[in-house]
Image (tube, rainbow, N blue to C red):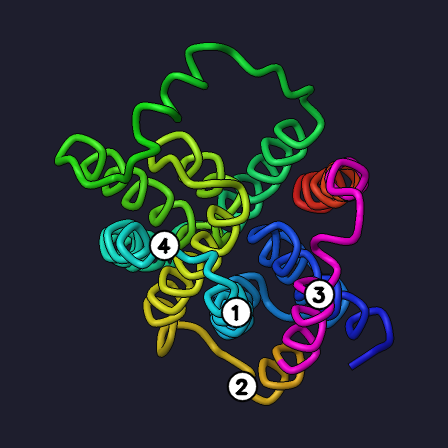
Amino acid sequence: MTLSAILAGLATGIVLGIFGSGGSIITTPALLYLLQVEPKSAIAMSMGIVAVTATITALQHWRNGNVNLTVTAVFGLFGIFGTYAGARLGVITPVVVQLTLFALVMYAAAWKMLRPVRPHRSVGAAVAEVSEGCSSPRCLSHVALHGILVGVLTGLVGVGGGFLIVPALVLLSGLSMKQAVGTSLAIVAVKSYAGFAGYAGAVPIDYGLMAVFTAVAVAGSFAGTHFAGRVSGEALKKGFAVFLLFVASYILLNNFL
């Protein structure tokens, strides 16, 4: 692996450790453009790398009491079905469509990170309404539906969907931001395993390269978890958003020119 690929692996783990999301958004372009992996193989390998990295990072958050197992089970269970279905669809979807959707997802993530946070009373009321716990059939059905929808996106374009899961957990399940990040990591891990299973056997996979990249990403995840409470989250979000804009633009230009 080149130095830039190693740095990308470290960045994958650090971003997952801090935000509970964003791993695949770094891993897939790194495999594609730094290591010259074929697009469908890169998507599949990215999910395998993120699955292992997110598992280890989620365990660190679980030890700190920041993983809600009930919400993880519901979101993860329905997310597995959606992710596997999305992965099977991804096997037959033209690469240009997958990469275009991937770039659009990156633009959406960047926009969400750059958008000023303006709390509304309705949002506060929604959080307060479910803060006692997501145990009602209505709440759990919403969590399950989001699990399916985010799962399909995960399988189709190879993103863990954490940037969608975290706000959904805060608003639907009444989790604190720390618990949402930890729970998101557990959900991302479960869904990524399902997505990888959907591609395994259908596309070529370099398991040796996956193992090395995963080891580097895991090392980065420990650093990310350690520094999560010691750095300015707002500054990191803005920097990461700018990075996403550049990479998404590069993917689209490379895809159509």
Percent x, y of residue 86: 33, 52
Q: Is mark 3 on a helix, strand or loop?
A: helix
Question: Which mark is drawn over residue 110?
Answer: none
Bin the neighbour count of mark 3 within 10 Å (Cα to Cα): few under 14, some 14-19, many 20 and up.
Answer: some
Q: Residue at x 23, y 43 (%)?
A: 144
Bin the neighbour count of mark 1 within 10 Å (Cα to Cα): few under 14, some 14-19, many 20 and up.
Answer: many
Query: For the residue marked with disc 1, what is the amino acid?
Result: Ser
Q: Earlier in the sequence, mark 3 or mark 2?
A: 2
Residue bearing mark 1: 41
Work out whether 88 lies above or below 221.
Answer: above
Bin the neighbour count of mark 2 within 10 Å (Cα to Cα): few under 14, some 14-19, many 20 and up.
Answer: few
Q: Which residue is drawn at 42% across and 61% down?
A: 186
Q: Which of marks 3 and 4 is nearer the N terminus?
A: 4
Q: Which of marks 2 and 1 is nearer the N terminus?
A: 1
Question: Which mark is drawn over residue 226?
Answer: 3
Residue extending furthest toward the front: 132
Q: Decide if residue 130 is on the left or right side of residue 248.
A: left
Q: What element carries label 1?
A: helix
Query: For the residue marked with disc 4, what is the amino acid?
Result: Asn
Residues at marks 2 and 1, CA–CA distance in whole angstroms:
11 Å
Bin the neighbour count of mark 4 within 10 Å (Cα to Cα): few under 14, some 14-19, many 20 and up.
Answer: some
Q: Which residue is drawn at 35% across and 33% down?
A: 131
Disc nearest the viewer among 3 and 2 = 3
Instruction: Tell me where residue 155 sits by quadrant.
Output: bottom left
Question: Which mark is drawn over residue 68?
Answer: 4
Residue 203 among magenta residues:
no
Disc nearest the viewer among 3 and 1 = 3
Q: Earlier in the sequence, mark 1 or mark 4?
A: 1
Magenta span dominant secondary structure = helix
